[in-house]
Amino acid sequence: MGDTERDGDLPVADAVAARLKRLETILELAPVGIGLVDPQGRTSMTNGALHRMLGYTDEEFATMPWSEFTHPDDIEPNAVLSRKLAAGEIDHFDMEKRFLRRGGGYLWTALTVSLVRDANGEPDFEIGMTLDITERKRLESDLRAAEERYRLLVERVPAVVYVAEPGPDGRWHYVSPQIERMLGFTAQEWMADPGLWLRQLDPADRDSAVADKQYMILAGTEVETRSDTYRIHRKDGTAVWVRDDAMVLYDQDGNPTFQGVLVDVSQEKELEERLGYQAFHDPLTGLPNRRLFLDRVDHALAGRAWPGRSSVVLFIDLDDFKVVNDSFGHASGDDVIIAAARRIKTCARAGDTAVRLGGDEFALLLENATVEQATTLASRILVALHNAPVEFSGHGVVIGASIGIAAAGPGETTETLLRNADLAMYQAKLRGRGRYVVYEPDMHKGAVAQFRLAAALRTAVAAEAITVAYQPIAHLHTGLVVGLEALARWSDPELGDVAPSAFIPAAEQAGLIQELGRQVMVRACGDVARWRVETGSDAYVGVNVSPLQLEDDEFPGFVVKTLRDHDLEPRTLVLEVNEGLLLDESSREALWQLRAQGVRVAIDDFGTGYSSLSRLRKLPVDMVKIDQAFVSSVESGEADLAFLQAIIGLAETLNLVTIAEGIETLAQVGELQATSCAFGQGYLLARPGPITLIPATLAAIGADHEHDR
C-alpha cells in the first residue's frame, strides 16, 4: 500500500519504470535460475543465477531454442508438458531435467514452469524456475548404488539377515533369501508366519533362546551385539545349529526391533564335538583317556559311597609288550593294543569306566564296588586277555597282563588312589606277572624305600662309589682261569651293602644305568688289563649289559674306545646279556656292530628266558652260560642230567662255548666233567672278590676236592 501512494506522486511512466526496475532487481537476486521462454522456444529473459548455472550469455539464451541446451532424453517429455500447458490441460508442471552447460557436461535441475497468456487468452510466454539438484541427484545415485551393493551382499552372503519384532508372535519385517537354503522356507513363507521361528526351535533349546531374546529387551537401549547358539529345525524336520548374532534397535517412538544375522554353524559344532571327543578319548582304541579317567575318579570320590563299598581302580599293564613292538613292529603292536582294549571293555560291567592311560597301560574305575568284585573282574580280564592269541600277519601273540587293585579309603584323593593301584600292579610284575595284586599299605612304604634307594644311588654314581668284584670262570679239568666276570658292588653308609638285584633295577628306573654301566666297563677293562700283565694270563673279562645301554647309539663306539684306551683286543671283552634282550631288534643291531669289531657275546642264565636253540644260529652269540637251576638239578636224577647233556650237545653243534653257572658241590663238578661242558663258575670254585686275589690258575678241582666226595 505504501508503494502505491508513493508511486501516485510520480508520472505514470516513471512509476512503471520504477516498478520494472524493482522486479528486475528481484529477478536478478533470486537464488534460483529464472527464464522467460517465448512461443518460439527462445529464452528471451534470464537472470544471473541461470547464467551461473549454465554459463550462457543473455544473447546466447535469446537466440537458442531451449532444446539446444537440453539433454536429448528430456526434450520430448518437456515438449509434451509445454503443449499440455498451452492447451490449458494443466496450469503448471514440474519435472527433473538435465541442461547442457556451455562448458560441457549436464546439470540436473528441478524445473517448475507456468504459462502467462495475453489479453486474448493466447499463450504469451512461459516462466521457468530452475533449482540445481545435481548434488542431490549424486547423493541419490550413491544411495541407490549403496542399497544395491547392500542388497547383493545381504542376499548372497552365506547367512540369513533379518529384522524382526520381539515376542513369540513378533512380525519379521525382513528376512534375506538365504533362509530358503538354510531352512527350506522361502522368505515370503517366513515373514508371513510370525510364530514360525518359535515353532521351529529345537525343544531342548527353545527356553534358553527365548530367554536370551527377552534379556536383550530388558537390558535397555544400549546397542550391544549378543550371540546365541541353538538348534532350529528345517522344513523337512532335520536340525541345524545356528549362531544368532543380534542387537536391539529402537525407532523414534521407542519400539524395539531385533536386527541380526543367522549363521549355519553345524560343521563347527560337529568339529567341536569331534575335538571334544578326541580330547577325552584315545584315538587308537576309542576308549576314554587319562584326562577323562581322572575326571571320573574325581567325581566318584566326591560322591557318596554305599555302605561297605567304595571306588575301586584296576591298573592294568600288558606284560612284555615291548617285545611285540620290537619283534613284529609298531603296527602289530597297535593290533595287540586294540585287541586288549576290546577284551577289557567287554569284561567291564555296565557303569564301569574302562580307559587307556597310554602305551600298554589301561585302567578300570568301579564305583560303589567291593574289593571282591574287583578281584573277580580282574580274574575275568586276565582270562580274556590270555585265552585267545591275537592274530596278525601270520603270527599269533598271547597277551598277558599284570593288574594292581586299589580301593579308596577315607579322605582318598585321585592321585593317591591311582598311585596305590600302580604300586599294586608293580608288585604283580615282581611276583611273576600274569596276575593281580591288591594294594596294601606296606607297598607304599616299599615305594618310599625305593625312592630313598634311588636317591642314595644317584649320589653313589656321581661320586663313582660303585666298586667291582670279580668271579673267575675256570676250566673244569685244569683249573685254568679263562675269564673273569665283573660284578658291580655297592656299599652305602646308611643302607649298608645293597644287592645288585636291588640297585641295578633301581639304576634302570632312575636313568642311571648308562653312567653306572660306563663306570663298570672302564674299571673292568682297566683292572683286567693290569691283572693280565701281572699274571701273564690271557683271560677275558665278562661285563653284564642292560638293555637300556644297548639302546644308546653311542654305546658301541664307547666300548671300542674303552678297549683301545686300555690296549685290549676286542675279543678280550665278553658282553653278557639276558635271553629276552636278544629279541629286541635295536639291541641285536648294537651287538652285531660290536661282534663285527671282535667283541664276543654270551647269553647269561640261559634256559630261563625266551630263546630257543634253533634261534641261536641267527643271533649274535658266542657263548651260553647255563643257568644254575639246570646245574643244581643234575644231582636229582638221570633225566635232569640227560636234559643238561642235551643242552650242551646242541650248543656244541652250533659252535657255542658252554659255561656252567652256580657250581656249588663236587658232585656237580663230577657230572659236568663227564660232559663236554669244559668251563664253569660258582662258589665252589671261587667267590666274587678283589681281582688281585685271583690267581691265573685255580687249584686242580678234581684233585684238591677229591676228599669231599
Image: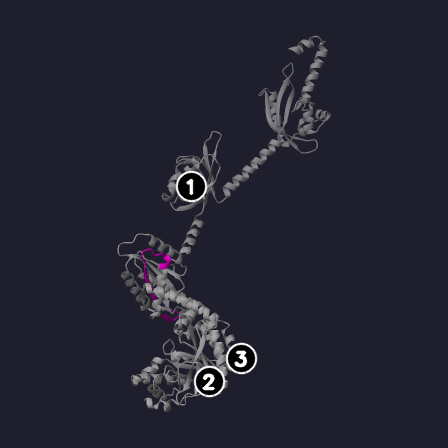
Secondary structure under tag 2 reads loop
Depth order, front residue of 466/53: 466
- The CA span between labels 1 and 3 is 87 Å
Q: Residues within 10 Å of mark 2 (few under 14, many from 20)?
A: many
Q: As shown in the figure, which amino acid type bears the numbered disc 2?
A: Ala
Disc 3 and disc 2 in contact, CB within 8 angstroms: no
Q: Residue 577 in the image: x percent, y percent?
A: 42, 76
* Residue behind mark 3: 564
Q: Is residue 472 magenta?
A: no
Q: Which residue is mark 1?
A: 185
Question: As displayed, is residue 216 above or below residue 15?
Answer: below
| Of the image marks 1 and 2, the number of the one nearer the N terminus | 1
Please state which of the two labelled residues, at mark 1 or mark 2, is closer to the viewer: 2
Q: Which residues are magenta?
A: 392-416
Q: Amino acid at mark 3?
A: Arg
Q: Which residue is mark 2?
A: 539
Query: Element at badge 1?
Result: loop
Q: Residue furthest top?
A: 9
Q: How many marks?
A: 3
Q: Where is residue 123 shown, x and y percent of the image?
A: 64, 19
Query: Of marks 3 and 2, which one's residue comes earlier in the chain?
Result: 2
**Rendered-image quadrant of the N terminus:** top right
- On residue 367, which mark appears? none
| Residue 89 at x, y percent in the picture | 57, 21
Which three-letter amino acid code belongs to the residue tagged 1?
Answer: Phe
